[in-house]
Amino acid sequence: MSKSPKSSPEYGGRVLQGPAPRPRSTIVWRILAIIIGALFVYAGALKVWDPIRFAGDIENYHVLPWSVNVRLAFYLPWLEIICGLALIFRRLYSGALAFLLALLLVFLGVSIAAKVRGIDITCGCFGHVSDQLSFAWHLVLDFAILAAVIVLWRWDRRPYRVEHVGY
Amino acid sequence: MISLLRQCLLILGLALLPAAGQALYLRDKVSWQSPIPASEMVTVANARGWGSDAIWLDARTAEDFEKEHVPGALLLNGERWNELLPQVLANWSPEKRVVVYCSAVGCGSSREVARRLRQEAELKNVFVLEGGWEAWLAEKK
Amino acid sequence: MNLPTKLLLGALFLGISTGAQAQLTWEKTEIELNPPAGAESAVATFKYENKGTTPINIKAVRTSCGCTTAALKKNDVAPGEKGEITATFKPGDNVGVLQKTVTVETDDAKTPQTVLTLKANITQMLVLQPNFVFWQANEDPKPKTIVATAGKGVTIKSLEVTSSTPDFTTKVEPGAAAGEFKIIVQPRETSHQINANLTIKPDSSVSPGKVFNASARVIPGAT
């Protein structure tokens, strides 16, 4: 992190670490974060339950070789759970949002690619619970979650308020 | 607040612990190198140990079968499935174990034959020979 | 000569030399086919063009299996000339997504070998689930059902089922949905070993005369 002149000790200033004092609408964002967090914990838990099946689902997209897919199948669900918990408990919040954003974008990308390539994919974000949803509804759901994560991300990235704590 | 990068690294690390634990716990149940589950493959030694309880199926082409095949094996490949399947089924009984093999070098036929037997004929105890025909030849010596 | 000049000259040289070489370019090196259910072959046409300045000779065209044949009109491709390789794939009784390759060898130094991939989605005209029913010796000879479903886009009006031996009786009933049939199979008794072949003839405009087989058995007890 670069030191702005106003925050260096010589100037006696200090950048307030963290977001600016929050307005009342905070509660809305907190609820949204908890909902999205819980969603990812749920999605991750479903996949943690049967990693071998998840490995098969990843293999279906035919993007990476099996040896990579099977290791991802063990890792990604736990990543989802940790990020979901991070959202709920507001710890490591930015990092979690960053990962969830990345995961959602990658997932959307390979889903669309698979559809274009004509691969029959039956796995959505929620393992095989969402088997009944058509592809279109899958996309709608995924875009909605993506939108929520982007909104949370942008709210979190609000500029810091610089406070001049002077001598 | 910790920097974004440190947060990401922490998250990566935190997720790695339970994932590694789970992977270690299930390490024998997972096929780490190929998509065929370990429970569906059998080594030449084990398959031979089944003796007359095993039905050997050759999933290669008829030419390869004619040249040489596992003694007592029946030919069953995708191209002539409808014609060859009845003979295989006539020899099967529930206590038998089916061992399907084909050339280990880039041949997915044995997997496909095994899959179709499980799915279409609903047979249980269908296995793919690990190492394929080449493994059999090696053990023959 | 300083380094940047050497690099520039080197790049220029490479550019000119590769530009002057022959170049066989392909419109698509991977083609996916979806032949209609019950089709006996699937054909993919791979188009190529010699975008270079020297003629190319196609030395060999090899296929990954005997089930695929590749046809080429002529081996020499003049600069600017276009051509095509027709790959015909006969799936036989194979089903599902099948991938076969055609390897093209040329004397073009830039692309001495190109692998063309043909992916075919083979669906059956009629799917039997399961295609094998059996009873153990002295098991209660209750009827068992084989569900016959018409493939996508295939209309089957009726099914005719005959057993190779009169030891099994067969009955066809309409299934839950259109194009679905229930074949009820029952042995008269299960005291001795019986091996029967059930011949299933669908009445359909697709591949008329094509028959499907299912097996029915009474399996002797372990001795």
Image (cartoon, coloured by chain):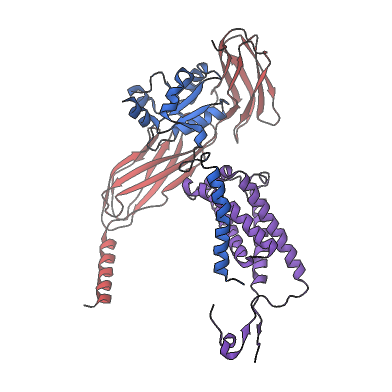
- Please state the horizontal and vertical placement of residue B87, each as a whole percent of the image: 48, 18
Q: Colour of chain A?
A: purple
Q: Is residue B67 left or right of residue B56?
A: left
- Evaluate whether residue A112 shows in this view: no
- Please state the horizontal and vertical placement of residue B28, each as a whole percent of the image: 51, 39
Q: Is residue C166 positioned above or below C55 on the image?
A: above
- Please state the horizontal and vertical placement of residue C45, each as a whole percent of the image: 42, 44
* Picture quadrant of residue C118: top left
B69 vs C32, nearest the viewer: B69
- Please state the horizontal and vertical placement of residue C206, each as a whole percent of the image: 56, 29
Q: Name the residue at 37% across, 50% down.
A: C48
- Looking at the rendered structure, the number of numbered marks drawn on it comes to 0
* Picture quadrant of residue C103: top left
Q: Is residue C20 positioned above or below A138 on the image?
A: below
Outermost residue toward the left in this view: C1
In the rendered view of the protein, which quadrant contains the N terminus of chain C? bottom left
Q: Which chain is red?
A: C
In the rendered view of the protein, which quadrant contains the C terminus of chain C? top right
Q: Is residue A86 left or right of residue B135?
A: right
Q: Which chain is blue?
A: B
Q: Name the residue at 40% across, 35% down.
A: C68
Q: Is residue C76 positioned above or below B13 on the image?
A: above
